Image: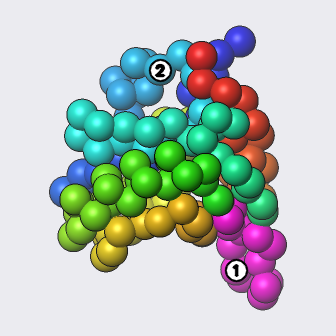
Amino acid sequence: MNVFIGMFLFSSVMALGTTTTDIATNYETSSIVFQVIQNQIAFDASTVESATIVAPEGANDTYGVNIKLKASAASKLSQMTGDNIGKRGNFVLNGIVISSSTIQSSIGGEFLVSGLTMEQANQFIESLSTPEK
């Protein structure tokens, strides 16, 4: 069974909770996808060196996922984010925006996705272990 897990999408305006079903239908993967307009990179076993869950420190804090990319993916992500500073970046999990922020600088080979529930963090980790098909 192929399940669309998520993507990172740049847009000028996108609110948390917005669905992206037309974009999601273009993928038959269970990987996290990073997309800038027409350019994209899949975050999966072929591009991710390691991914670990970061537990909340306080009772009201959220979970996060610390991701370290392989060299080729890190280079591509750095270029993509560097070219889109000032634009919104969104992580989408199962068609729902779960994390949204403004790109303030080029993102290198290691970054943290925060603001996740425990279930979302676990789904994120699971999706990264499956190579794109």
Nearest the viewer among 69 and 122 is 69
Q: Which residues are magenta?
A: 54-66
Residue 15 in sight from this viewpoint: no
Residue 12 in the image, given as x and y percentages of width and height? 19, 57
- Say which quarter of the image contains residue 41: top left
Quarter of the C terminus within the rendering: top right
The three-letter amino acid code for the residue at tag 2 is Tyr
Element at badge 2?
loop
Relative image position of residue 62 (x, y in whole percent): 69, 72
For mark 1, what is the residue? 61
Check disc 1 and report its element: helix, strand or loop.
loop
Residue 114 at x, y = what percent?
60, 68
* Front position in the image: 99 or 107: 107
Q: Say which mark, if any, is on residue 27.
A: 2
Which quadrant of the structure image shows residue 78? bottom left
Marks 1/2: CA–CA distance: 32 Å
At 29% from the left and 45% from the top, the residue drawn is: 36
20 in relation to 113, above or below: above
Q: Is residue 7 magenta?
A: no
Residue at the top extreme of this rendering? 1
